[in-house]
Amino acid sequence: NSSATTTIVVGSQVLVASILGGVEQAVAIGDDVELDGSESYDPDENEAEGPLAYAWTVARVLDDGSREDAPALLGAVDATSAILAFVPDTTGGWLGDTTYEFALTVSRGARSAAYAILVKVSSDRFMPRATVTDFDEGLKYNPTADTFAAIYFEATSPDPGRSCCDSAWEVEGAAACLPEDEGCLLGKAADAASPMLVQLGATRANTVYRLKLTVTDGIGSTSSTVVSLTTNGPPTSGTMAVTPYRGTALQTEFEFLLDAWSDDPDDYPLTYTYGYRQRLSWGSSRRRLQRGGASRGRRSAELAPLTPLVADQYASAWFYTTLPKADNINITCVGRVFDRYLSFAEAYAPARVDALEMSTEDLSAFAGDLLSATADTGDGEASLSLISNVASVIGGDEETDVNGTVIEKTPEQLAAEQALIDNLFAATIAAASQVGTGTSAAATSQVLSTVSTLSANPETLSEDSQSGALGLMSSVVGGASSQGIDPDTAASTASTVSSLLDASLFSGGGDADTELGGQMAGTVGGLATAMIAKAYGGQSQSVVSDNLELTAFRTDCGTRDSAFGLSTGGGVTGMPASAMDSAGGGACDAAA
């Protein structure tokens, strides 16, 4: 016998200190001022070390830029609370038209962190006030295309006799620009109403931007506030490997390894997700094209939506799984490496997956044993991954022999496949309840992707499976309306809608169509809402499948209120009319 020991030291994360309202603020002599440091926090939430302690200090900024400590200015206030409240008046030693630096140090145990801002004290008590009411400067923002950061603000005047106020935003060090200009950071006109949007897709990774708000009242008096926006960069320098390179669907266990990825020290810990993409070959798309889908040339070059293999981000850089049958043997394995701010790098590795040669009866027994084993462990995400893999092996209403000759399946074979799909749908519903779709976007993606795989061939779906698919999809999509779904998940959901519209309950018309129309309409509405959950007014998101073209757009300009609208392309067939009714007001004014 032999043994080995190792020591693992788990270190503490650094504290995060923060002061709300901007890195440069303006107040007037005699104002009641509050500097709010309550958003400072301990990422470890280690209450065993005691509560967070706060300590405020102030220094006068001299003409040459140096600092002169002024502890007496805070002598009469509580400088150890999360919110520093004081009145800068001349009797207390404060000077008008002077800038002060306020520093907040938070500590817990042996750890500490500091944050500082500049506050200009004006002698004009009636100057307008520029106030940032909601923006987190402590976050790192990911420079992702078609995404925005919102800075909420207000302009006020203490003088009721003055009209208030014109506002103007600028990016310090950058030329003035319009939102439609390439590379422009401002997502709205500089004088637009709150919130101001920052086009994160126009930012560079690992950069600090300063955005200045200036407000002007009716007699030309001004004040300004500056906020800083720090961008994040994804993990770098790693590799992805999948071994073995070749195996058999459902039988070979593949190892995914994401190795040697690194990031900035304060961006840890790293987490990982795993999935795969199949290429949509001509053969796999033939049924879709016969239904009037995209052209052969377009389809043959497409990749299917990402199929997730996990329902959450893993702390482990390696993962073991079986893989599905690949339409053309080749499959693209995908790994994503996330940092704590959810910026991610995506890596790829090819694998070759041979078809599993097994009768439907034997496949049912084989799948039943595997599903029973995963069900016993309560591992919902493993069950969902297995269900997708089994579904990939099930053919349509015909198959080819070794010579490429098309052979129609017997009624008995088709009945056996339908029974297997019924069982897989039942297992999917059970597994979905274990993975937390209400709180996890990754779990939502895995469940909806599994339903899409099971629903790929409408001809094999019994009415029970159709009802189960629609019910599960309606529930999961509705639950995702607030957290949003990504484009891959939206594409999977739209594909399921298309298949169900071609299946017997809808394509046959009659009472069943009417009864299920409301549920289908709710699902489509939920999909639209989830697609734009993170969008702002004026933005839209679209998804296209073989008989559905759906666009969801914000109509409440520049905000994230609930109004939205739906529009569809002319090629939609079979969709209940109620699903296409407008769900919001008119289009967003481009100038807003």
Image (tube, rainbow, N blue to C red):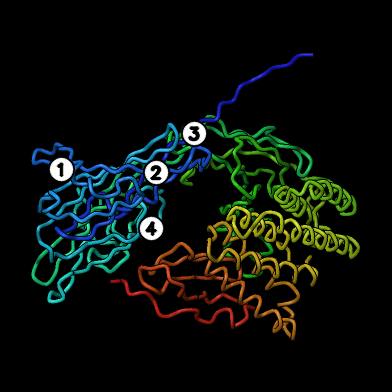
Near mark 1 (Cα within 10 A), the count class, few <14, some 14-19 or many ≥20, is: many
> Which corner quadrant of the image does residue 305 belong to?
bottom right
Q: Distance between the residues labelled 2 and 4?
A: 14 Å
Whether residue 345 is visible to the viewer of this picture, yes or no, is: no
Looking at the rendered structure, the secondary structure element under dot 1 is strand
Looking at the rendered structure, the secondary structure element under dot 4 is strand
Near mark 4 (Cα within 10 A), the count class, few <14, some 14-19 or many ≥20, is: many
Near mark 2 (Cα within 10 A), the count class, few <14, some 14-19 or many ≥20, is: many
Q: Which of marks 4 and 3 is nearer the N terminus?
A: 3
Q: Vertically, is 256 above or below 303?
A: above
Query: What residue is shown with label 3?
Result: 12
Viewer-side residue, 365 vs 585 = 585
Q: Closer to the camera: disc 3 or disc 2?
A: 3
- Mark number, residue 137: none
Q: How far apart are marks 2 and 1 (CA)?
A: 32 Å
Q: Quick check: marks 4 and 3 in contact, CB under 8 Å?
A: no
Q: Which of marks 1 and 3 is nearer the N terminus?
A: 3
Q: Which of marks 2 and 4 is nearer the N terminus?
A: 4
- Mark number, residue 232: 2
Q: Position of residue 154 (x, y in %)?
A: 27, 66
Whether residue 552 is visible to the viewer of this picture, yes or no, is: yes
Query: What residue is shown with label 1?
Result: 60
Query: What residue is shown with label 4?
Result: 148
**Residue, far front:** 76
